[in-house]
Amino acid sequence: MSYPLTVAVVGAGYWGPNLARNFNLSLDWRLAAICDLDVDRAAALASQFRDVRGTSDLEELLADPEIDAIAIATPARTHFAIATAAMRAGKHVVVEKPIADSSEKAVEMIRAAGEAEVVLMTDHTYCYAPAVLKIRELIRAGELGEILFVDSVRINLGLIQPDVDVFWDLAPHDLSIIDFILPGGLHPMSVAAHGADPLKAGKSCIGYLSLPLEGGAVAHVHVNWLSPTKIRQMIIGGAKRTLVWDDLNPQQRVSVFDRGVDLGQQAIDEADRSAVTISYRLGDTWSPALQEREALASMVSEFAESIRERRTARTDGGSGLRVLRVLEAASESLGGGGKVVALADPTAPTALDGARSVQLAGEPA
Amino acid sequence: MSYPLTVAVVGAGYWGPNLARNFNLSLDWRLAAICDLDVDRAAALASQFRDVRGTSDLEELLADPEIDAIAIATPARTHFAIATAAMRAGKHVVVEKPIADSSEKAVEMIRAAGEAEVVLMTDHTYCYAPAVLKIRELIRAGELGEILFVDSVRINLGLIQPDVDVFWDLAPHDLSIIDFILPGGLHPMSVAAHGADPLKAGKSCIGYLSLPLEGGAVAHVHVNWLSPTKIRQMIIGGAKRTLVWDDLNPQQRVSVFDRGVDLGQQAIDEADRSAVTISYRLGDTWSPALQEREALASMVSEFAESIRERRTARTDGGSGLRVLRVLEAASESLGGGGKVVALADPTAPTALDGARSVQLAGEPA
Amino acid sequence: MSYPLTVAVVGAGYWGPNLARNFNLSLDWRLAAICDLDVDRAAALASQFRDVRGTSDLEELLADPEIDAIAIATPARTHFAIATAAMRAGKHVVVEKPIADSSEKAVEMIRAAGEAEVVLMTDHTYCYAPAVLKIRELIRAGELGEILFVDSVRINLGLIQPDVDVFWDLAPHDLSIIDFILPGGLHPMSVAAHGADPLKAGKSCIGYLSLPLEGGAVAHVHVNWLSPTKIRQMIIGGAKRTLVWDDLNPQQRVSVFDRGVDLGQQAIDEADRSAVTISYRLGDTWSPALQEREALASMVSEFAESIRERRTARTDGGSGLRVLRVLEAASESLGGGGKVVALADPTAPTALDGARSVQLAGEPA
Amino acid sequence: MSYPLTVAVVGAGYWGPNLARNFNLSLDWRLAAICDLDVDRAAALASQFRDVRGTSDLEELLADPEIDAIAIATPARTHFAIATAAMRAGKHVVVEKPIADSSEKAVEMIRAAGEAEVVLMTDHTYCYAPAVLKIRELIRAGELGEILFVDSVRINLGLIQPDVDVFWDLAPHDLSIIDFILPGGLHPMSVAAHGADPLKAGKSCIGYLSLPLEGGAVAHVHVNWLSPTKIRQMIIGGAKRTLVWDDLNPQQRVSVFDRGVDLGQQAIDEADRSAVTISYRLGDTWSPALQEREALASMVSEFAESIRERRTARTDGGSGLRVLRVLEAASESLGGGGKVVALADPTAPTALDGARSVQLAGEPA
């Protein structure tokens, strides 16, 4: 382990203490300061750690040459200003999800990271859960084959949020995970969102997202605040095997089914496809052992490693942007009564790609 | 028990034998004949029962004054011709799902039943499963309160059908059940269908149906032939309680959760709704004992009772029509890439309603 | 497939029809006759099959040279007389469990089989369930390593039997399975049975069997008629892996856990054993695909194969005897208030072993 | 809430910090001191709280008139000396399980509590889990009827303890819970313990306890360190209903089955009991909502309330003694190869009962 990097946490509200605790425990990091507009809150959090100062002066932090990185856990509307100021000051940045309050700002942030040659990471914490890391690894190793569908369900009795609907509250988890595990990230061709507000709460409390992917595949997300039964399940169907992640079954969170539907080989051409022979394959099931590590601890490590290795982080600014674009399209679809909202051709080069290639001379996430 | 009614089963293929067996076992019925274009197949099935004749002559059956009713288990495209001929001959009719191969024909069939003053029933077998009968009873008794949402999942490894996609293969089960349990039947305001064909089988193998209901409620159906995990679960959220039906848990198929989200009472007007106070209610769970009876046996009883009581059957022609209309709209939505297809105003009077009111002087299903 | 063997089923009560149906469906067998003291019952069952005669004359069957084998499904007290008569007539015999109403008679039957050089098989049907066949195969392949413990639970609401207690009603299933899967069969060093009759039904309705095995291993069986929760689970702990069979989980009946407790290697001598280093091994879980075949169909095949291959059957007379001896010892223990009843040294040569070696020149089961 | 009582925690090792944290959070208590032979360890724990002193001087604590109560979390062999000294100094005492290292000492401690007129409580923490409190409440309200059987399973991969076998490590949980929920406490007529040490670790790693109760009822405990599957389940069969507690199912920990076996009423006399008519009752299942509260917080409250109300605590010295006596008998049984060890007639008056009646003028636990 090399000499630790130094970090300051900005925002001492709900999530900041978790970040601070994990940076403090990590051998990769030295936690130097907590910054909050409310200086008392900053000081109270700082006092829980040794040699950590509390402050309300962001300028001072950004001017401090000892500080390598800033972790931002403030309200979303402030992410852009804080992150860009930090990056212009040469600081690496990890920012709470959503990365910004608009995709335009997210694009700007990614561009700024590229120009400053710093790491811009989105704190998609759930991606660093041991189960998700294992799923990503299995998919990249080709264990599932080409991905055919992803069906994600995240339902529970949930407090109706004052400021966001169920899509913006819960679906970022599913979307960031899907973005993380799909080999090229989440690039749906369109978004259709169907919501319901049966309690007349003024916003969707039940939501369904349909995201057609290239090649006939599909991702679908069901989020729901009104279900007394708690379900957190993702089914990831592949051409070779299918994986089921049941996050509420601690004894067997991840199952890989060597089981599927096979199309026979008689088909001569596309026109004849409907005549193909179909058969089942009923094979074994396998459940990998998972390491036990707090997701946030792994996130904090990845932040350090991406800085040291001068590469983009696994959940970089681009992943934050992709999730944000789907959420924005979902809101647009919802506003149109469930209409299908096309997204830009995911294969076309974009300004963003330019920004990403500039960002750091690392491999893509 | 009064003197049994007499029935002939038309169609000795896949489903006919099940109908024949249940009519034969029922004290409500005397099974008189099996009719099939293939007279040997008819005779072979008839020979399994005492005093049942096999025939290929439908005309003769319809002319037989001893026969009160006809059960039709032939291909869907033949339902209309056989059923209308039978009804014009004064026979009561139960017809396999789908009721017809187009909703226009279904409307005609309902009208014919009204004119002939006979019962026209759709064999939505699953509606007569003990769990579904109990769910209907609970909802009608007000145990759940107003229905806020229905989420139905029916996924499994399934043979890819040569003639139909996954919507037409599996969703009729979900739709007929939802139609059966909702107090006024299934009257979605629109239909959006999202399908995927990742194996390039030439039809959707994965499907999602979004069906907004009046008052902000929603029904949603997920059907899937490609899932190695089998799930058959329906969550029915009510204003008072929420019910979960897990058909693969024989030890506790139906659970009623006295648990939910409560909106507080501070809200003064609609505009202020977003300021309502939200709270959880975490109450008991209750799982009713279910009788053990084959669904088809209950269906056959209902057919007899509706004839005797001169009322429409619980799963009448109208239910068959409503399911068919949703499937037709789903296909239209699918053809339009998931576009939202509006259905006629469910509260407006229709020609159908006229037909239904003529049908029999009974209560609506 | 060679020319089929010919069989007659003796006993047309509860189990006989199942045997008859499976013999009739098997390509290995020709079902020739049904025999029952009640000739009408014999004839009624026979009439369900083509070219099968019903009779009450056992003598005539045993004298018929066309009949190769007899399947006995009569009350236990009659097994000895029928089986020995049949074997003396040169017929192979499969006999319903329990093999006899006393272990002395079972020993005699085994001896008779050896003298007549015929197969004597016990119909331990459950041993031929796909899950059990797979478990046996895994254990024999060394996948679990040495067996350390077997814990079997079979509890449910069950009718209190008029003639037997819960040990004799349910435990034969567990015991025959344990006998089948343990490499050398079930040879407990002693038996302790603890029963309870809290309803004052006149016999144990709840039972626990403790069966210490050689080398410090143990088998334990819990049977219970009074549990509203149905559990059928067997945990088989091995030195390398542990297997869990949950017969009520059709989606994953058999799970193999590559997980266990490891003793470290620091221990120098036996005396120092308490100082060993202990650690967990948390590995993957694996669930093998199981074929789908009725257990009784496999039993019937094994009967034919053992005859053709001139070897003892997998569930031979010895397995029937071993199960019976444990049940007798359990009754003795129960009569002594749960006292520990020693069984004969399982490694010592016995008259039985002689009988077995004579039986057929085949490999041991 | 009246003025808080003052407590000192003795022992700052594994469990002491949990006690200290809960006393500190409780409004019933003021935590005054931490005492440990290792004064640094005492000081370190004390420093985590406001105004708590660390000390190694037990004498000084016992002489402090401000201290009302002592919580003992030291090794079992020291419980007797510390507790009796504290009680003679007029302090109320709660002591970690096991209450002492021999039942003779436990009897002495109970007697000392009676003489000093102080509360002596055993910290059977698990008894204060919301599920267990609810079970006790349901049984006391007669919801289950007379208790017929208790079957408790607590198995998991567990570290092999250096000093105790699996009975002494795990069974105290089951035994203390059974003692807590049975209306009169746990008074088995005998104890039979069957253990196995297949890894040759020098002590039982698998254990079964059979505990016949009065009236034909039975309690049984299965504890196991070698199971890769974790099960924590207790089935409590009653004459009216049966309860299942599955502690690993957070969505439905407690289920009450209105389901059972009914003996009919034809039986005329005991001799004729075997002719009784048996039938099933298949009723509803009900799962009560449970409050969410840490068990140790409820334990700490009960300690305060029992002192204030001048009554014995729910888990008093007697409960600690009863659990200890069963464990001692289990060890004796184990030493005798599983022999049945009779316990003293549970209905006979004992010296202990005298001690208990003296203890405090409260209701029995």
Image: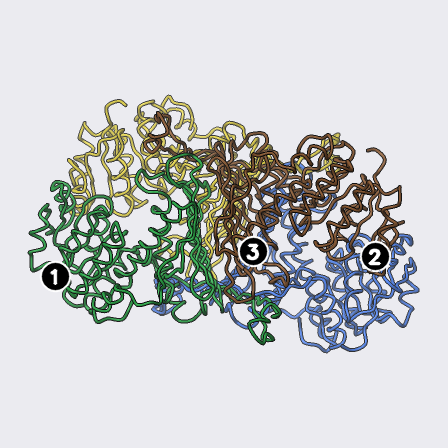
Chain colours: A brown, B green, C yellow, D blue
| Any part of residue C287 in sight | no
- What's the distance in space between the residues labelled 1 and 2, CA to CA? 84 Å
- What's the distance in space between the residues labelled 1 and 3, CA to CA? 59 Å
Do marks 2 and 3 share a chain?
no
Secondary structure of the residue carrying numbered label 3? strand
Q: Indicate the position of residue A119 as horizontal and vertical percent values.
A: 75, 38
Please name whichever residue, A144 or D89, is drawn nearer the observer in this view of the structure: A144
Q: Chain of mark 1?
A: B
Callout 3 crowding tier (Cα within 10 Å): few <14, some 14–19, many ≥20:
some
Where is mark 2, residue-wise?
A42
- Tell me, for residue B90, which label it has, or none: 1
Q: Indicate the position of residue C112 as horizontal and vertical percent values.
A: 32, 30
Quadrant of res A309 = top right
Is residue A6 depicted above or below C336 in this figure? Answer: above
Amino acid type, residue under disc 2 in the picture = Ala
Of the residues tagged 2 and 3, which is closer to the observer?
2
Please name whichever residue, B249 or C333, is drawn nearer the observer in this view of the structure: B249
Residue at the image position 24 percent from the left and 67 percent from the top: B354
Q: In the rendered structure, are the residues bearing label 2 and label 3 in contact, judged by CB atoms less than 8 Å apart?
A: no
Q: Chain of mark 2?
A: A
Q: In the rendered structure, are the residues bearing label 1 and label 2 in contact, judged by CB atoms less than 8 Å apart?
A: no
Secondary structure of the residue carrying numbered label 1? loop
Is residue A249 depicted above or below B281 in this figure? Answer: above
Callout 2 crowding tier (Cα within 10 Å): few <14, some 14–19, many ≥20:
many
Amino acid type, residue under disc 1 in the picture = Gly
Amino acid type, residue under disc 3 in the picture = Asp
Where is mark 3, residue-wise?
D246
Quarter the N terminus of chain B occupies = bottom left
Residue at the image position 49 percent from the left and 40 percent from the top: A149
- What's the distance in space between the residues labelled 2 and 3, CA to CA? 43 Å
The answer to whether B299 appears left or right of C362 in the picture is: left
